[in-house]
Image (tube, rainbow, N blue to C red):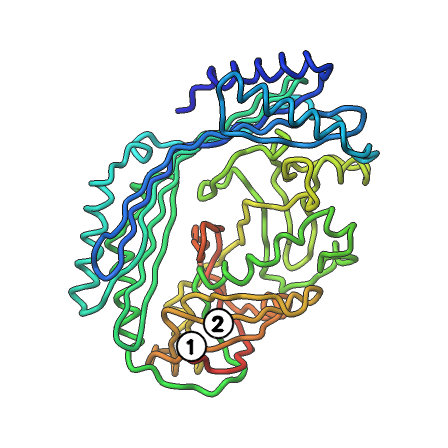
Amino acid sequence: MLDKRPWEAIFSQVLDTARSLGVTEVEAIFAGGEHALTRFANNAIHQNVAERTAHLSVRPVIDGRTARAGTNRLDAAGIRRVVEEAVALTRLQAPDPALPPLAEPEPCPVVSRFFPATAAVTPAERAQAVAGAIAEVESAGQTAAGIYSTDATFFGLLNSRGVSVWHGETMARFSITAMASDSSGWAKAGACSHLDLDPLALARAAAAKAVRSASPRELAPGRYTVVLEPAAVLDLAGQMFGDFSATAIRDGRSFLTDRVGVKLFGGNITIRDDVRHPLQAGAPFDGEGVPRHPLALVEAGVVREVAVSRPAAAAAGVPPTGHGFPLPNEYGEAPVNIVIAGGDTPVERMIASTGRGILVTRLWYIREVDPYEKIFTGMTRDGTFLVEDGEVVCGLRNFRFNQGLIELLSNVVALSPAVRSSGEEAFEMVVPAMQVEGFRFTEVTRF
């Protein structure tokens, strides 16, 4: 677990240096940890890397001005230099009447997300798990590629008003793509404990998708009933949560402008932001040390709450929600612990109830087309299947889609139980699979 004492000693040096420069209001953020990764391709491990990082970021507040400077030099000279740089930068800024004073201490929720056994995973242990996954894919006549990573990280924030909040966390992620001559399959999972991952099961799932989607047919573009597996739901629905921001709404760059309190989605859509959810990860406080409060973002299709940082809260005369980014920033805040409530319909039952439709494993290369209606384009990949009369018939060539999120979340007819799901990058949410009517595919891709 995180030993706070060295960092508290560094903060004392930060305070002493700031005071020697005539500054009494100062905030420091400490972040870093140990990151290790085993990468494999062509059915062989080809890279094992590990790094240890530590970073100090200092932000003074001087007469309504603020700025930030950072360093990874944590000796006495490095600490003094970064404080001097932060103070000099701050004095060059114009006063900001909307800048709040430093945060005051508040009780913070406790979450336990550090697993010593995960922090201690060795390259040999990762290699053994990878070897088993490769053997599973290879036995199906396919080629495996992917990553197995383990991290042990820390994040702490202290300020001169007495805020002292800390979070230590471990995270393990396993991703695998199984490639055949004309098809592929993919699976990925992440968890705070590596014991919650099953690389062999993920490899089997990826290999099975590659087998099932061999010799893909071409289907005409159009509107279809789709079964979106959790990763596909995350890939697409995850694009909208930066808009659940009081600052974005104030600036007119959110699709929720003039829509809070409006029923935008189907009555079966309920979405929360909840750092304490057992499948979630991350610190229970934000970039100013404010405790994260649970948010009812959407209730039965109605947009209810949005994230509010301290600057936005001061402007609106409401309490902050604990979702602000470190100041100074131009984005304000966003919910980061998304939980889309699930239902009781497993994917198998969704497929069985589909007369003619498409099963989608995941999406990629997603780009926004219309920011107000939240229309996105992108492509399917690594397992796209034709469903007829309640059964998966064959693999399909991949599609490009052009789909609005408001429309999609208004046409959901079934939800699976929610699970922790991973996307292309280290982006994860708790989401269900969804059966959706009228999903719009615009063309067949070349890939």
Q: Where residue 375 sits in the image (x, y, percent)?
A: 63, 69
Q: Is residue 11 left or right of residue 135?
A: right
As displayed, is residue 163 above or below residue 123?
A: above
Dot 2: what SS? strand
As displayed, is residue 246 above or below residue 442?
A: above
Residue placed under numbered mark 1 in the picture: 398
Q: Where residue 89 sits in the image (x, y, percent)?
A: 70, 30
Dot 1: what SS? loop
Do residues under tags 1 and 2 come within 8 Å of each other at their CB atoms? Answer: yes
Q: Where residue 237 sits in the image (x, y, percent)?
A: 56, 60
The amino acid on which the numbered mark 2 sits, given as a three-letter code, is: Met
Residue placed under numbered mark 2 in the picture: 379
For label 1, count other residues whose C-alpha is less than 10 Å away and answer few (under 14), some (14-19) or many (20+).
many
Q: Is residue 2 left or right of residue 157?
A: left
Distance between mark 1 and mark 2 Cα atoms: 7 Å
Image quadrant in which the N terminus is located? top left
The residue closer to the viewer here, 204 or 446, is 446
The residue closer to the viewer here, 385 or 397, is 397
The residue sitting at 57% across, 14% down in the picture is 13
In this rendering, does residue 331 appear at all? yes
| Mark closest to the chain's N terminus, 1 or 2 | 2
The residue sitting at 34% across, 59% down in the picture is 187
The residue sitting at 31% across, 74% down in the picture is 183
The residue sitting at 29% across, 57% down in the picture is 202
In this rendering, does residue 113 appear at all? no
